[in-house]
Image (spheres, rainbow, N blue to C red):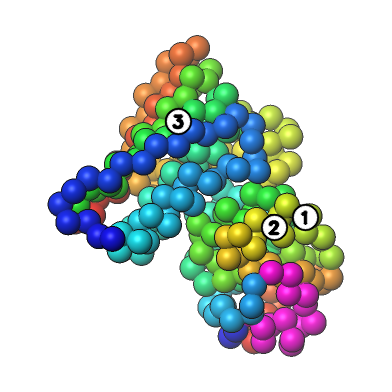
Amino acid sequence: MGLSGQKVTLRYTIAAEDFISAGEASSHVKKTLNKLGIRHELIKRFTIAMYEAEINTVIHASGGEAYVEITPEKLMVKISDNGPGIPDIEKAMMEGWSTAPEHIREMGFGAGMGLPNMKRYADDLAVESEVGVGTVVTITVYLS
Amino acid sequence: MKVKTLVEELGMTLITGDGEKEITGIYACDLLSWVISHAKTGDLWVTVMNNVNIVAVASLAEVACIVLAEGVKADEQVVKKARENGVTLLGSSMPTAEIIIKSSKLI
C-alpha cells in the first residue's frame, strides 16, 4: 500500500458520550497512515490533533462525523457536529479555558487544552461554528 | 531500558505487553490533554487515571508504557483495550514521585 498520486478518503461516525470507543477513529487513521508509509512525526501530529477534535465532539456535541482525505500533498480531516456551537471561538482557543462539566473533568478531560493542542499540532486549523447549529473543525498537516 | 527491566528492578506488575518496549524518558500527569501534547515517544507515563481513555492517549502519544501508580487497579475495559491496541500497562504500589525518582536512576 502506498500513495502514488491517488486520494484516500475515510469516513467515521463519532458517537455521543461514548468514552469507551472515543479515539477509535483517530487510532484507525493512524494505522492507515502507517500502512501508507507517511512520515512518523507527521502521523503523530495529525492524529493527536484529530483525537482532540474527536473527543470534543464526544464531550460537547451529540457526536458527529469525521471525513479524512489523504493526498500526496496533505492530510486533512473535517470533523463536523450538530452540537451547541462555540459562542466565543477566541476564548475557546485559550489554554485553560474549558466549559466541560465536572464528570468529564473527573475522567481527565476538560483541561482547556483541546483546541490549543489542535492549533499546536496542525499546520492549518479552521474552526467554523454557529451557536445552536454546530461546529466544523478542519485540521490539515502538509506532507511536503 | 526495556520495560521488563523496570518491572523487575522496581517490583512492578506487568499487566499487558511483553515488556520488550524501550523506555527513553519519563512523564507524569493525569490530565489527558496535557499528556497527549507533552509526553514524548518512548516515555514511561505515570498516572493514577484508570479509565479506558488512557489507552487511546498512550497509543497516540506513543509512550513506551503506562504505569498506574499508588496501587490503582486497572479495570477490565482498560486491560482489554490495552491488549487490543498493543499498549503496555504496568501497576505499582509506589506513589508517583517515588516511581519517577527510582526510574530515573535506571534510564
Residue most extreme to the front: A1
For image coordinates 48% across by 19% down, the residue present is A82
Q: Quadrant of residue A79?
A: top left
Q: Amino acid at mark 3?
A: Glu
Residue A102 at what x, y percent from top left? Answer: 73, 33
Residue A98 at what x, y percent from top left? Answer: 59, 33
For image coordinates 28% across by 60% down, the residue present is A1
- Within-10-Å neighbours for mark 3: few <14, some 14–19, many 20+: some
Task: Give me the C-alpha separation between circle 2 and circle 3.
Answer: 26 Å
Kindly identify which residue carries mark 3: A65
- Answer whether residue A78 is magenta in the image: no
Which type of secondary structure does the marked residue at label 2 adopt? helix
For the N terminus of chain B, the image quarter is: bottom right
Q: Are marks 2 and 1 in contact (CB under 8 Å)?
A: yes
Residue A42 at what x, y percent from top left? Answer: 33, 58
Chain holding disc 1: B
Task: Give me the C-alpha separation between circle 2 and circle 1.
Answer: 6 Å
- Numbered label attached to residue B76: 1
- Numbered label attached to residue B80: 2
Q: Are marks 3 and 1 in contact (CB under 8 Å)?
A: no
- Within-10-Å neighbours for mark 2: few <14, some 14–19, many 20+: some
